[in-house]
Image (cartoon, helix red, strand yellow):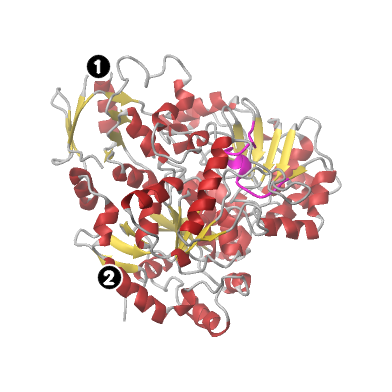
Amino acid sequence: MTPLNEVDGRAIPLGLKNVDTDVIIPAHWLKTTTREGMGRGAFEAIRKDPDNIFDSAEYKGAPILIAGDNFGCGSSREHAAWALGDLGIRVVIAPSYSDIFSGNAVKNGILPVVLPQAAIDRLMEVAQTDPVHVDLENQTVTTQFQDRFTFEIDPFRKMCLLEGLDEISITEKSAAAIGAYEQKLAQDRPWLQPSL
Amino acid sequence: MTRPRTLYEKIWDAHVVEQRPDGTCLIFIDRHLVHEVTSPQAFAGLRASGRTVRRPDLTLAVPDHNVPTTARLDASGNKLPIADPESAAQLAALEKNAPEYGIRYIDAVAPEQGIVHVVGPEQGFSLPGTTIVCGDSHTACHGGIGALAFGIGTSEVEHVLATQTLLLQPSKTMEVRVEGEVGPGVSAKDIILHITGTIGAAGGTGHVIEYTGSAIRALSIEGRLTISNMAIEGGARAGLIAPDETTFDYLKGRPYAPKGADWDAAVAWWKSLATDPGATYDKVVIIDAADIAPSVTWGTSPEDVVPITGVVPDPASFADPSKQVAAAKSLAYMGLEPGTRMQDVPVENIFIGSCTNSRIEDMRAAAAVIKGRKKAASVKWAIVVPGSGLVKAQAEAEGLDRIFTDAGLEWREPGCSACLAMNPDKVPAGERCASTSNRNFVGRQGPGSRTHLVSPAMAAAAAVTGRLTDVRELMA
């Protein structure tokens, strides 16, 4: 996973609330056995309009996306995070996310920034004409107009993003603890072993 | 004396392998369900890193999302080819990956094949008090039998395959208490649609919802699975309903369920899981069952719920400005005008199925409305898709298939089908579908499709009249 710290660039002012994962990547794009190429199907219904924001000269390849409440709700498909990544998006800024999406995003080196609606409204305004700067280390979103918003992030997620860590390698360091848990489980709840 | 704990806290505590200094916990996963769509990249990841599956014995794979719901065997019992090459490739990948890693595999033509969330409880593989994950957000479903069950992404699928654990932060807790008795024509689906409309699509974000109260306790396991299935539509990654005698009666004797002395030990443990008196939740929502009507969605978010007796709302009627914008967009997509009576909305398609509503009780509820009636001529496509081969066989033994086919509905093979339109079952662009599934998202049932979420009885009523219909009118 590519480490992420500072991201500077144009921010796509999508702004909608409840952007679900079917909107981010419709199900028929899920019929694949690889992670690549999802960007082609990203926001397919919106991008049917030739004047859509994602393919406009101004925002094509922009690294930041601004959205409304409950971004990434619905399906658990990680294809949504792959699709955003394939579009070049490294940061999403929204008032809230679905729990599954925000986890998937972090695992793919995409930072889900949570800011209150008032900050979103201001950034939507700036994004019309100017870039936005995101700094994960300092947990800030700033603009050239002296706007400065700070955001919270779970320290474990922050570390994974900053260092580009793979969670499986982290967990493998706990192999002995997992083994001990399994042994205790076999004694405490032996009926958990599927009986067939 | 330990602090009183909720059902969620007890299950969580019993599964902590290790706690990191930053509060993240390593949680043991008791059951991993795998299907063909979200697993190929996880298996590829294992292969690339030279890792193996830690606990194939706790893993069960079954194809469901892509499988066609038309006949799968020819007259001589040979497997029919799958027309779509991409679907065929995904199904072939699971068929290859499962045995290669020693994982139990239910083949697409096996008698017990079905939607993974129907199969898990039906086989007794899903059990109360366990942690269950699957690369599918409707894994929340298994909370209906009292399991802490939630959807995961493909990276997490790979993580669970490799380590049988997940790195998680504890969730907040939310109680949704539904007290009293529901009226005639009101099903579990109407209860959960009403709840979703009440709390909103993000109402449960960051929380695990425990559904409590007399109206929940009165439900069968099928109804409880319907409720918990849609916890995710209210933003909660998992739902829970405390296991009780109804749960134990349902599970006893199922193929993978504990047997003999093991069963008794399991039941004793399950009984200890109920939320302690005095335990508190971070959020509580109380609903009077008598306020719940047969319900229907009007928009493109599952929170867009009105009683069937209601009208399409005016976007200006919402207090939240972003909801006003969203509602206006939804109505444009749905082709609806504010003030239109929901009962005047015509539907051309009917879908009875999905992990929300494809169990035997759902089949019976729909058949009871259809029996002796005919599908309206204006309904072009009406399919009934049982949730598993076992549900299908049971329904056929009860003659329900004939009731549907006599009325002009199609009786199909089990799978996810038109809930998400990955297989050939799609709703045409611009057309409406009264659907027993869980999501009315833009394009969910096919590009341009317009979905109205309803209960099985309400879908059956719409099939008969060709418009969204108050099922109570057909019950007289």
Residue B172: in sight, yes or no?
no
Q: Identify the image quadrant of the N terminus of chain B.
A: bottom left
Q: Residue at x 56, y 61 (%)?
A: B120
Q: Where is residue B133 in the image (x, y as percent from the top left)?
A: 44, 57
Magenta region, residue range: B412-427
Separation of disc 2 and disc 1 at Cα? 53 Å
Identify the image quadrant of residue B224: bottom right
SS assignment at label 2:
helix
Report the chain holding disc 1: A
Rendered position, A50 above or below B154? above
For residue B398, side relative to residue B282 (left or right): right
Report the chain holding disc 2: A
Q: Which residue is drawn at 38% across and 35% down?
A: A36
Q: Residue A129 carries which label?
A: 1
**In the foreground, B120 or A51:** B120
Q: Position of residue A41 (x, y in %)?
A: 45, 29
For residue B41, side relative to residue B472 (left or right): left
- Return the disc, 2 or 1, that comes first in the chain's sequence: 1
Q: Position of residue B208 (x, y in %)?
A: 41, 57
Q: Estimate how packed mark 1 is, as few (under 14), some (14 to 19) or many (20 or more) residues with alpha carbons within 10 Å.
A: few
SS assignment at label 1:
loop
Say yes or no: labels 2 and 1 on the same chain: yes
Residue holding disc 2: A177
Identify the image quadrant of residue B276: bottom left
Residue type pointed to by label 2: Ala
